[in-house]
Amino acid sequence: MVRVFKYILILIVLLVVLLGASVAGLYWWFNQPRVTMQEADVFAPVLFEVPRGSHGRQLTRQLAEQGYIEHEQLNYLAARLFLDADRIRAGVYAIHPGDSPRRIWERIVAGQQHQFRVTFIEGSEFREWRAQLSQQPYLDRVLDDLSDEELMQRVAPDGEFTHPEGLFFPDTYRFTAGTTDLQLLRQAYNRMQRTLDDLWQQRQEGLPVSAPYQALILASIIEKETGAAHERGLVASVFVNRLNTGMRLQSDPTIIYGLGENYRGVIYRSDINQYTPYNTYRINGLPPTPIAMPGYDAIHATLNPEQSEYFYFVSSNDGQHIFSRTLEEHNRAVYQYQRN
């Protein structure tokens, strides 16, 4: 009897050891990357969608059918043992070549969805934003059929603005699948409001703008006038000097914006002479709205311009400008850099 008990005990120990070895082996296998590090550098990540209502067995089957895991049943068993395999979250996930089966499961169980990106550059116009948003396949579009005015009522229902130009902060925005274009635009709108409010508190005295929105209008013109960061303060000084002395801004980008689809790629004399609310060769002061989305630096330069006696500038054809104090100096610069 003692001998039988001893054999049973040995058998139990062997079974426990065998079971422990099996679990350890399964854990090791579950944590092995699908490819070597050298191979992982060659292949790009792929996107994998987990539909709503999916459960662990469905996910295992889907991963196996698409070739992201091997041994479907072992994977499901390992996921049940080492993770909460049935608490998966719907969404779109990135699967990297070097991922182990465990890493794939962990990402889905934790809801670590892939972050998509969309970048809006400084100086872009709202029509370009709408076009970019319409090309994002994983962004839910709820604003496509709305006019700009209707869109602004959705983005900022308590706001006073009906024209969207200039009201959204240009930057790179990240989003997960299922985010709406409305959510993204509200984020950009709120960021612009915070930025403008902060910089307005830091403005110089004696500026020819009496409200943050006027500063935004002027900043949008400065953004379109120069792409050279170190020039923004001087360009701002030119327009500030003009506004303070009653001169017209005479900014070419405002003509282009006012022409809209009628712009022919070159500004003709007839365009300069044509009246639009945005043609600052024909109107006094600022146009009624911004003409583009200004970035932080353009807004900062608008509210803290350099001190200068410049009233004119002309392109030197290398992305920069020549600044002049008088019309005579300006005409010489135009002759040297443009007519020659």
Image (tube, rainbow, N blue to C red):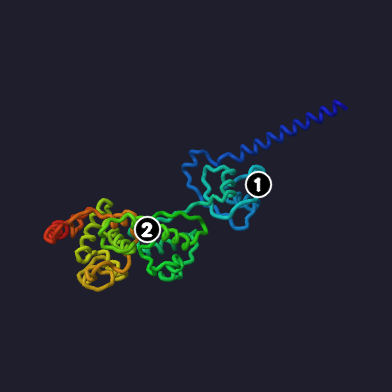
Q: Position of residue 220 (x, y in %)?
A: 31, 61
195 relative to 254 in the view: left or right: right
Residue that extends furthest to the top in the rendered view of this protein:
3
Q: Nearer the viewer, residue 78 or 252?
A: 252
Q: Amino acid at mark 1?
A: Tyr
User: Which quadrant does the C terminus fall into?
Assistant: bottom left
For discs 2 and 1, the disc positioned in front in the rendered view: 2
Residue visible at 21% across and 63% down? 244
Residue 284: x and y, percent? 23, 69
Which residue sits at x=75%, y=31%?
Answer: 14
Choose top left, top right, bottom left or bottom right for residue 223: bottom left
Asked whether, in this view, residue 54 is left or right of residue 7, the answer is left
Residue at figure coordinates x 48%, y 45% from the top left:
43
Looking at the image, is 157 positioned above or below residue 21? below
Q: Circle 1 is placed at which residue position?
A: 76
Element on which disc 2 rests = helix
Looking at the image, tell me whether mark 2 or mark 1 is earlier in sequence order: 1
Residue 319 visible in this rendered orientation of the protein: no
Q: Is residue 90 visible?
A: yes
To which residue does mark 2 refer? 197
Q: Which residue is most to the bottom?
A: 275
